[in-house]
Amino acid sequence: MPAVYRFAHFTARPATVQKTATVPWEIQQRVQVSQKLIICTCATAAEVNKHLANEQNRAAVKIQAHWKGYHTRHGIPGRRHHLMQVRAATVIQRMVINAHFLYILLTSS
């Protein structure tokens, strides 16, 4: 994760702090790109290809994770209600089965 530089600006009252400033996203991207270029010029072609493949894989995993989270949160409308109905039906079925076995045990002796 890139470093985020924070600067606190204090007002006349030391108990309050104004907004925290961060380095703009564009500057962070430029620094990362320049670091990658330096790495690419010092490495062999095989190492560069391996590095780029790893970056693409990490990016794909991140995109898939975000999509899965979004799809899980916003998937099927009424999904929670349906799950509650399924759980309730399971509990009722389990109670009926237990009662049936209890009835068999009590009547067989």
Image (cartoon, grey):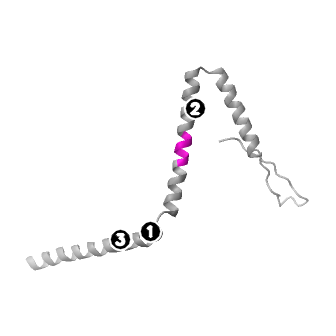
Disc 3 residue crowd, few under 14, some 14–19, many 20+, Cα 10 Å: few
* Residue pictured at 68% horizontal, 28% vertical: 37
Quadrant of the image for the N terminus? top right
Q: Name the residue under label 1.
A: 79
Q: Name the residue under label 3.
A: 86
First in sequence: mark 1 vs mark 2: 2
Question: Of circles 3 and 2, which is in front?
Answer: 2
Answer left or right for 37 relative to 7: left
**Quadrant hosting residue 56:** top right
Where's residue 80, x and y in %?
Answer: 45, 70
| Residue 82 within the magenta-colored segment of the rendering | no
Disc 1 residue crowd, few under 14, some 14–19, many 20+, Cα 10 Å: few
Q: Name the residue under label 2.
A: 52
Q: What element carries label 2?
A: helix
Please, what is the three-letter code of the amino acid marked with disc 1?
Arg
Predominant SS of the magenta segment: helix
Please state the extent of the stretch shown in magenta in the rendering: 58-63
